Image (tube, rainbow, N blue to C red):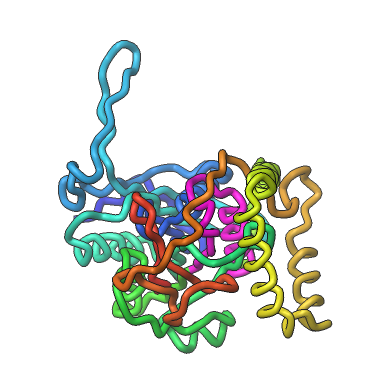
Amino acid sequence: MIELEGVPELIDPVMVAAFEGWNDAGDAASTAVAHLDREFKGEVFAALDAEDYYDFQVNRPTVWMEDGARRITWPTTRLSVARIQSPKPRDLVLIRGIEPSMRWRSFCNELLGFAHELGVEMVVVLGALLGDTPHTRPVPVTGVTSDPDLATALDLEESRYEGPTGIVGILQEACAHAGVPAVSLWAAVPHYVSQPPNPKATLALLNRLEDLLDLRIPQGELPEDARAWQVGVDQLAAEDSEVAEYVQTLEEARDTAELPEASGEAIAREFERYLRRRDPQPGDYASEGGDGVPQFRDLGRQQRPEEPRNGEGHAADSGDGDTDDSGDGTGEDGE
């Protein structure tokens, strides 16, 4: 039974979720939800039972010291509530956890039980994938839904992906069967510099979430972190002629693909988005930028047959999706 004692009546609640692991390249999605939780002072009201969903040999508990006593933190999924005041009051139900090891259907049903009890109006799941996208260009973010009406209303892509999927795809499909509107937002992370963190991709996801939900999200230090991240990758690329040449090839492919979009109407839309994001508070609405210690991946990497692609079934060369072969198993299915 789900107990929600102590949770106040929510205002137009939207559930925003991200899961570490296969659907979280560069930790971009989980970091975005952590940012929302921190900036809006989210209050945890529930945590799923770790015994039900996690293999502790895969996701091990951690031991730490507090006031001389040993404590254990178990891998789990936590739910918190945060209230946004601008441009109008609205509540976010934030879900942050690790992709479960087992019982995915029960996992999703439990989350949907919370959504039902709280009166959630929409579920937005954030994900990040590895793609053939250059770090020097804006991070592409693709919005996907299984609901044709929602795709039309919110100008999203209708998912037609077929292939292996992660918990993001399972949760979105569970929402569809339960009649809960659901959207997935996917950021494309350069596969040649995929290790976390990737603040530029995190910032791109938050910006797209702003547009989708008509919210104001303080950006804090993310813009400066993103700029530092890009400068670091630029420096590494400048020291390796092979990498520099490869990045230039990606830039040319990206620019050629987006050339038809460089119309007056497209530029006007981007300017309107910029104006909506303007905020008198310093640092709240700066441009994209990054942090971290970048390292390059093998440029000869090839997609393995079993790896999934994005929501439309094609790899990301202009930001729509790609796969992951990193050791932590992050990747994308696009659903």
Q: Position of residue 152 (x, y in %)?
A: 55, 87
> Which residue is depicted at the point 58% across and 43% down?
39
- Give the percent coordinates (x, y) of residue 201: 57, 56
Of 196 and 2, nearer the camera is 196
Boundaries of the magenta span:
185-213
| Front-most of residues 34 and 197 | 197
On screen, residue 324 versus residue 103, left or right, reads: right
Which residue occupies the foreground of this view, 308 or 305?
A: 305
Q: For the C terminus, which image quadrant? A: bottom left
Q: Is residue 61 left or right of residue 33?
A: left
x, y (%) of residue 299? 50, 58
Q: Is residue 49 left or right of residue 195?
A: left
Which residue sits at x=51%, y=82%? 157
Q: Residue furthest right?
A: 264
Q: Is residue 174 visible?
A: no
Q: Nearer the viewer, residue 246 or 264?
A: 246
- Asked if the stretch drawn in magenta spans residue 77, the answer is no
How many dots with numbers? Answer: 0
Q: Taking 115 as reference, is 101 left or right?
A: left
Whether residue 186 is situated above or below residue 53 in the rendered picture: below
Q: Residue at x 81, y 77 (%)?
A: 268
* Magenta stretch prevailing secondary structure: helix
